[in-house]
Amino acid sequence: MGILPDGLFTLQGLWFLLAGVFLIGYSITDGFDLGSAFPMIFMKKEHDRIALYNSVAPVWDGNEVWLIAGGGMLFAAFPTVYAASFSGFYIAILLVLWALIGRAVAFEYRNKRESMVWRHTFDFIYWLGNVLPAILFGVAVGNAVVGVPIDKDAVYHGTFFTLLRPVPLAMGLVSFFMFAMHGAAYLLLKTEGSVFEMAKKYAGISVVGYVVSVILTNVLAMAEAPYLYKNYFTYPILFAIPLLMFVGVVLYVYLLKAGKYDKVVYASGLVNAFTVLNVACASFPVLMRSSINPEYSLTVFNASSSTLTLTVMLIVTIIFMPIVLFYTRYAYKVFSGKVSGEKSYY
Amino acid sequence: MVDLLDLSRFQFAFTAINHFIYVPLTLGLSVFIAIVKTIAYKTKDPKYDKLAMFLMKLFAVNFAAGVATGLTMEFEFGTNWFTYSKFVGDIFGAPLAIEGLMAFFLESTFIGIFLFGKDRISDGMHTFSAWMVALGSNLSALWILIANSWMQTPAGYKIVQTPQGIRAELTNFWEAVINHTTVIRFLHTVTAGQITAGFFVMGVMAYFLLRNKNVDMAKAGLKVALIFTAIVSVAEIIIGDTAGHLVAEYQPLKLAMMEGKWKTEQPASLDVFGYVDQSAQKTYPFIKIPGLLSFLAYHNFDAKVYGIKDLITMYDQKAQSYANEANMLKAQYASNPNPALKDKIVADEAYAKAYNISSKDLPPINLVFMPFHIMVGLGFFFAFVTLWGLYLYKKGTIYQNKAFLKTVLYSIPLPFIASELGWMTAEIGRQPWIVTGVLKTADAVSFNTTSNVMFSVITFVTIYTLLFYVYVTTMIKKVREYEDVKPISSTVPSPSGVSIGLTANRTDLNDNNRIS
């Protein structure tokens, strides 16, 4: 037995890692878009609300593509998992979809009229469009790793309410606060004045929320889903991942206390990445666990695409990922610096 | 009582049709803006720069709606078509993933740079961004058309057994990607988008000229748009004709439904307009031109065109021979269990199931026959209008000719409609299959409850109707209030009327606080 799980360095195992890369890419980029919007409904001044929109306006669209590309990757590399989760989690998935539609529409149309009723309606849609996905992503991933009633053909036998169990719900809180930490850190980087002051408090609250929800998740999971800890004890080197997650949290608090506000976002990025990796470690090689019979679980080995498809997609990813990262970095450079709520981008 | 299949079909059709309200304009306008921006960059003529920024503002409104509704399409394969996704994911998932990676990132990142970065980057870089948006949106269309063309005319795959059921597996990437129809269907779609954008710009410029507003910009815009649209409208007739041949060659049942042919004819007449009585299995044409369909479909006045009834019989015979072969192989397999034989049996059984169709499985043929003929009619109309415009331009009277200006203004919706009709022909015409000859739509749906899908149908109808309303009113408002670059004063600190490219000026940003 090696120090890392068997099969991690096969083509399928590599695709498991790549799926992780896309999830991390999403939570690091669109994560701060989501998190930066949570305070929206608590902001009373029009000026402050516009500053929230402006902080993410030029980049959110590109960030959301991580989700779209990631969804495509899941479809291409693990089609059965895509089919089983999207059809099984029907209402939950559509709630995320409608929320994201609302978010996109609010960005573009909010400032097209002067009416405050119009604007506040879109502000609420925008807020919901960020809060709902932030929670539901955690709930969905939680259900996949804890287990859902899928049969041998990967058909889901449950309802929307089957998904609302303690561990996945706690994981929904984790993802919510993880994005909140990241969003707060991003606002510290991008804003000034009253929004900046708000972000300081917001960052403090969210890091506490994150720690509490992580503890809660683990307490519940030890009782209800002990199998999620098996990989760590079989391959103790994996304990490095929760450790690094913890380091991220400590760093976040330190940077906040030390007043290095433009650096906090790196710490929350670290927390995002290692939270995702942690879930991946706990679950490997299972992508979607069956609560009916463990034999029916969808793993990277029994639910992956053909070797040819995985190889082609790997080549495409190796070619295009660096290009994407290159121009994404360029875009962030173009838009570096603080924003204000004086004028709206849209 | 509506059943799950009908509801799922309705939802997909409704969301796809809504998505395609916004897509053609995105495809065409991105290219048009890049061309105008390049002219501005080369000539340093401010009216072209103004035109590019004005159009980009409209583009942004349209793009947001396209992105929002596009997300639905990617989700829906999984949510509502479980068996389909599981069956074809090995092949169909790849183009969707590549679309995201190769095209959508490009488009979404550079649209941010183009819209908001004007004052932070050089003019050359700004022009480059416009081209990247155009490249991204058109590459996006390419991969979607690759995926869709595989559904129309599948190639480069084999059918195998997996632990969670049977599926189609990739055997040759390039065969699957450049299958029989991809290239021409891609050209057909993007050219339609360019016609849409061309008429959109001509119409808006005509509106300004009729109102005597932004005259310099409007004249320049109308001229460029006219030349652009004339080229693509004429090209589309040739491309469309080629696309028709491919349908005749690879999808004879679709051809028969497009033309309303129940019986095999040799030579076949072209029935222009009319209606189909599906229960009586008859078509009542208003105009009949002998031999023309044979010529159009096969470039031969004597060619045979198969009718729907004969095709169904032929498919059933095919299904029977697959079933027979499967039974024979099963007997062989019993004595000699070799895995290659097993794959062949699985494939034969899948084909036997797919080809086993009856007239009850056919879609509403009027929704194939009529849209197709109206689309073709509109295609000729577009070419005619642009040629008329070129004639007036040559005479030098185009900017004063009210009849022409009004025609292009009121023609704005027509290319949108033509695109939708084209897709109706393509998608309804592919029925009863979701993947031609491989999987029936009826066998592809998710195991879901009717109430869940009813709930989502109602929500989609509500959201999309509101979106459409907001979209149309916002577009009209943006055009109406545009008078050169004059911000509209407002009491709130966010002047919504300001041209987007100019809002992202230095006052937005505090350079002293830059990190890095």
Image (spheres, coloured by chain):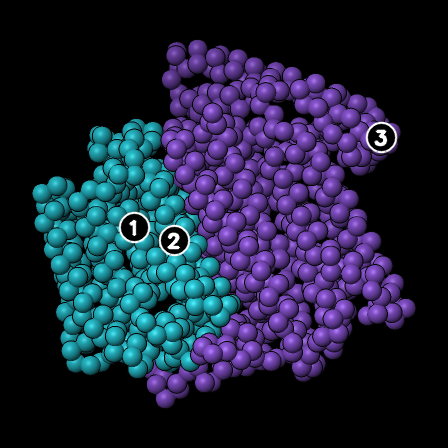
Amino acid bearing label 2: Ala
Is A260 in front, or is B385?
B385
- Image check: A289 left or right of B109? left
At label 2, counting other C-alpha atoms closer than 10 Å, the crowd grade (few under 14, some 14-19, many 20 or more) is many
Comparing labels 2 and 1, the label whose residue is closer to the camera: 2
Which residue is identified by label 1? Answer: A136
Q: Could you confirm whether marks 2 and 1 are on the same chain?
A: yes
Say whether marks 2 and 1 touch (CB < 8 Å).
yes
Residue B246 can be seen, yes or no: no
Element on which disc 2 rests = helix
Q: How far across and how far down the image is residue B128, in percent?
A: 57, 72
Q: Which residue is mark 3?
A: B288
Distance from the alpha carbon under mark 1 to that under mark 3? 58 Å
Whether the residues at callouts 1 and 3 have beta carbons within 8 Å, the answer is: no
In the rendered image, which quarter is residue A23 located in? bottom left
Q: What is the drawing colour of chain A?
A: cyan
Amino acid type at circle 1 is Leu
Tell me if B352 is positioned left or right of B384 in this view.
left
Q: Position of residue B371 (x, y in %)?
A: 69, 39
Q: Which quarter of the image is occupied by the C terminus of chain B?
A: bottom left
Which chain can be seen in purple?
B
How many numbered dots are placed on residues in this image?
3
Tell me the residue at 65%/34% (across/down): B367
According to the image, label 2 marks what residue? A99
Q: Residues within 10 Å of mark 1 (few under 14, many from 20)?
A: many
Image position of B386 with respect to B514: above or below: above
